[in-house]
Image (cartoon, rainbow, N blue to C red):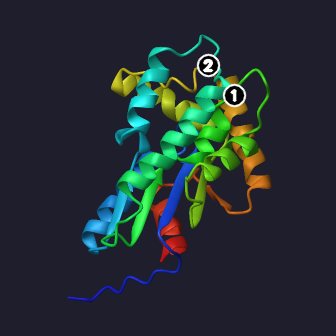
């Protein structure tokens, strides 16, 4: 049997972010399979499954405004909860070589709009100040908005659920533009084109982290 040597070129934290329908969940599942197959000490997580971030997401969802706007206090609270969640669950994990996060500070920067016009960059910096570590590798999974919108429409039909953050093509285009603006301002972000097969995308991601 051929022996596999896992060679880390980066430290610990990898983030996969991007619009709905760009393949984040698929790639996270493929990474889980890869970690199991090659016995990599890696963990793939979704923040909203861990406290106190989990409770805050549920509270916001129950009391969200019709315009999906965030108050300045809510933005602050999310940043504090994110920092505390990381400290509580992931700050001391010598058993882990890699921690992969499905959506992270960039999601907050893109989605947490408010009437005062706080910028995505401001929100990201606030999260970093409140204890969220900057990823060692940040991947923006991206494709044309028409493609990602069509994917989630097909997924919604199959699952009989609705993607709450992409209720129209125009909304999807707006979300993508905010991500692309971060791509220009955040030098750590690397764009990964996802208008390809999941296997091709997976190989590119493995190349980036191995």
The residue furthest left is 1
When the figure is inspected, residue 109 is found, relative to residue 14, above or below; the finding is above
Q: Secondary structure at mark 2?
A: loop
Q: Within the image, what quadrant is residue 150 found in? A: top right
Residue in the image at 62% along x and 27% along y: 73
- Across and down, in percent, residue 76 comes to 61, 35
Residue in the image at 56% along x and 53% along y: 131
Quarter placement of the N terminus: bottom left
| In the image: residue 174, left or right of residue 22 | right
| In the image: residue 66, left or right of residue 115 | left
Q: Nearer the viewer, residue 208 or 54?
A: 54
Question: Which residue is label 2 attached to?
Answer: 68
Circle number at residue 19: none
Q: Nearer the viewer, residue 14 or 197?
A: 14
The answer for how far apart the CA atoms under marks 1 and 2 are is 8 Å
Q: Is residue 27 visible?
A: no
- Across and down, in percent, residue 36 comes to 26, 67
Q: Nearer the viewer, residue 173 or 150?
A: 173
When the figure is inspected, residue 83 is found, relative to residue 11, above or below; the finding is above
Question: Are discs 1 and 2 less than 8 Å apart at CB?
Answer: yes
Question: Which residue is label 1 attached to?
Answer: 113
When the figure is inspected, residue 11 is found, relative to residue 185, above or below; the finding is below
Report how many numbered discs are placed on residues in the image. 2
Q: Is residue 143 visible?
A: yes
Q: Secondary structure at mark 1?
A: loop
| Dot 1 or dot 2, earlier in sequence | 2
| In the image: residue 118, left or right of residue 151 | right
Q: Nearer the viewer, residue 188 or 165?
A: 188
| In the image: residue 62, left or right of residue 170 | left
- Across and down, in percent, residue 145 comes to 66, 36
């Amino acid at each position: 049997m051929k022996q596999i040597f896992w060679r880390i070129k980066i430290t610990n934290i990898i983030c996969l972010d991007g619009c709905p329908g760009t393949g984040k969940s698929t790639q996270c599942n493929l990474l889980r399979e890869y970690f199991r197959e090659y016995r990599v000490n890696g963990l793939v997580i979704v923040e909203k499954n861990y406290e106190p971030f989990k409770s805050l997401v549920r509270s916001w969802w129950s009391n969200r405004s019709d315009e999906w706007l965030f108050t300045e206090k809510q933005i602050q609270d999310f940043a504090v909860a994110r920092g505390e969640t990381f400290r509580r669950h992931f700050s001391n994990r010598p058993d882990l070589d890699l921690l992969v996060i499905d959506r992270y500070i960039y999601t907050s920067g893109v989605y947490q709009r408010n009437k005062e016009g706080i910028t995505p960059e401001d929100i990201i910096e606030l999260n970093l100040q409140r204890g969220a570590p900057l990823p060692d590798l940040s991947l923006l999974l991206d494709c044309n908005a028409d493609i990602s919108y069509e994917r989630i429409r097909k997924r919604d039909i199959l699952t009989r659920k609705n993607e709450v953050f992409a209720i129209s093509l125009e909304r999807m285009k707006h979300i993508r533009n905010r991500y692309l603006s971060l791509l220009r301002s955040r030098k750590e972000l690397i764009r990964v084109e996802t208008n390809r097969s999941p296997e091709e995308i997976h190989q590119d991601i493995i190349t980036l982290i191995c």
